Image (spheres, helix red, strand yellow):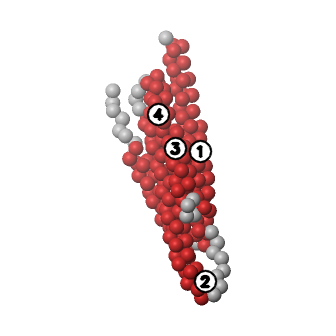
Amino acid sequence: MKKQRSNWFPVLLVILVIGGGFAWLMNYGFDHNDLIREMFAGASGDVYGEVAANSAASIAARAELTARISMLIFTGITVLQFVAFGVGFAVVNGIKRSGDSNKLKLKRLDNAEIFFDVPLYVGLFGTVSAFLVMTFSPQSSRLIAYSSTLIGIIFSLILRLSMQYPLRLKLIAAGSKDGDEK
């Protein structure tokens, strides 16, 4: 039996490049786009008086730091989602391209079930992380919690519906044809 080479590296490299690009884009957008900044910091209010202005400068610096930390947490969780998706994609493609029998491929696909749930677990991690962020930025914590959960659900569904189910169906059909011939 000829050993298949692993196709993890190219997929993960592409995912990491996409993740790095996303991280750069989020950081650039935070520095140059008020909409992205307001997603994590909220709109700033007006301040009156000299004492209020000095106090507001200190509060604004703290708000800027907490907003950037929130943006970095959001970006990190989103990149983890892309990596989880890429790993699941690579696992399914590895099973699909292997020279194993259809019965063995089907067993390997059953064994790879955990990789289809990893985006959900990363989404749950993002939701729990949002509770930690809530202490200093309630607005961005909601953004992190909802988006990480939503991305996890979407990525898990894509892996299951577009990759796992069609491959499982194909392997079952091929297995029943093999069984009919015997």
Q: Earlier in the sequence, mark 1 or mark 2?
A: 2
Tell me, for residue 112, which label it has, or none: 4
Mark 1: few, some, or many residues within 10 Å (few <14, many ≥20)? some
Give the amino acid at mark 4: Ala
Viewer-nearest of discs 2 and 4: 2
Q: Nearer the viewer, residue 59 or 127?
A: 59
Q: CA distance from mark 3 to mark 4?
A: 15 Å
Q: CA distance from mark 1 to mark 4?
A: 18 Å
Viewer-nearest of discs 1 and 3: 3
Q: CA distance from mark 2 to mark 3?
A: 44 Å
Looking at the image, residue 13 lies above or below residue 34: above
Q: CA distance from mark 2 to mark 4?
A: 58 Å
Q: CA distance from mark 1 to mark 3?
A: 10 Å
Q: Nearer the viewer, residue 177 or 86?
A: 86
Residue drawn at point x = 59 percent, y = 41 percent: 157
Residue drawn at point x = 60 percent, y = 61 percent: 138
From the image, tell me which residue sits under label 2. Answer: 52
**Circle 1 — which element?**
helix
From the image, tell me which residue sits under label 3. Answer: 121
Give the amino acid at mark 3: Tyr
Q: CA distance from mark 1 to mark 2?
A: 45 Å
